[in-house]
Image (tube, helix red, strand yellow):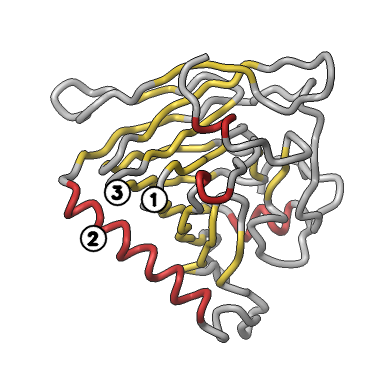
Amino acid sequence: MTGEPMKRHADDENEIHDVATFQDPAQNVVTPIMRLNAELASQMVWAFARIVRAGHASRAARSPDEDGIIRAQEFEEGDVYMLEKPFDGYFASRYLMDFYDVTDRGICSRMHLHTGLRFVRMMTGPGTTIRVGSLSPFVVTNVAGVTPFVPEQFTDNLPDLPEGVQRTRYNLIVPENSFVDMQIPRGVSHQFNAIGPNAVIDSVHPEESIETFRERMSGFRMMAQTIFLTEDRPDVASCTGGES
């Protein structure tokens, strides 16, 4: 187990750190995987989304199991379901997220970081993109003859900051009908916002047991493993516009 606790209050599900002084310790690495036809992409996205929705409709998944784990949870970007949980001798877990459509909700998710590293596979279907943001530039994998496309990137100003504070936000667009991976080091800022109804994430938390112990949390909860960098969720225009 390495590293010191990052949180001030281990079980706080809305802990906010100072965005003016925050500095990313590393950078997110993005790897485009594939582009699919609309029919196949739609089938795959909805196959994953149905698992999450079944979990949230299940009394067993919404109740603590023998280890006190609740599999069906909610996060700012969408509903989540812990598909595979950690156990003694195996520290990792795996979550599926069924994204909210920000155009339906009228708000965007906030910039945040996690108490442990993450691996996420973003998957989009027809008429849907995912706008990914960070306070540091993305490193994009581009292997000649293998990488299928290079995603669009641009910068703007992070919205809803305290008076006198300005931070550059780096943005990357996951196009419709595509799979894109992102490796997120521990403590590195990021946000996801789905624009459209057909988007899911398959997310591996390689050290969930370790980070829960390190932070002295009372249980496995995505919100408690998260530190936010702004107070309020901004208006939908802040994550649906293009280059400023």
Q: Which of 52 and 7 is in front in this view?
A: 52
Q: How far apart are marks 2 and 1 (CA)?
A: 11 Å
Please tell me which residue is depicted at 57% across the width and 27% down the height of the picture: 134
Q: Which amino acid lies under the numbered mark 1 shown in the image of this protein?
A: Ala
Q: Distance between the residues labelled 3 and 1?
A: 6 Å
Q: Name the residue beneath numbered marker 2.
A: 43
Relative to 29, is 11 on the left or the right?
right
Please tell me which residue is depicted at 52% across the width and 37% down the height of the picture: 184
- Asked whether disc 3 touches disc 1, contact meaning CB atoms under 8 Å apart, the reply is yes
Relative to 162, is 191 on the left or the right?
left
Q: Which of marks 2 and 3 is nearer the N terminus?
A: 2
Count residues near mark 1 (Cα–Cα under 10 Å), then give few for <14, some for 14-19, many for 20+. Answer: many
Q: Earlier in the sequence, mark 2 or mark 1?
A: 2
Q: Name the residue beneath numbered marker 1.
A: 199
Label 2 residue SS: helix
Q: Which amino acid lies under the numbered mark 3 shown in the image of this protein?
A: Gly
Q: Distance between the residues labelled 2 and 3?
A: 8 Å
Residue 125 numbered mark, or none: 3
Please tell me which residue is depicted at 80% across the width and 35% down the height of the picture: 17
Q: Which amino acid lies under the numbered mark 2 shown in the image of this protein?
A: Gln
Please tell me which residue is depicted at 52% across the width and 14% down the height of the picture: 244
Count residues near mark 3 (Cα–Cα under 10 Å), then give few for <14, some for 14-19, many for 20+. Answer: many
Q: Position of residue 157 (x, y in %)?
A: 63, 18
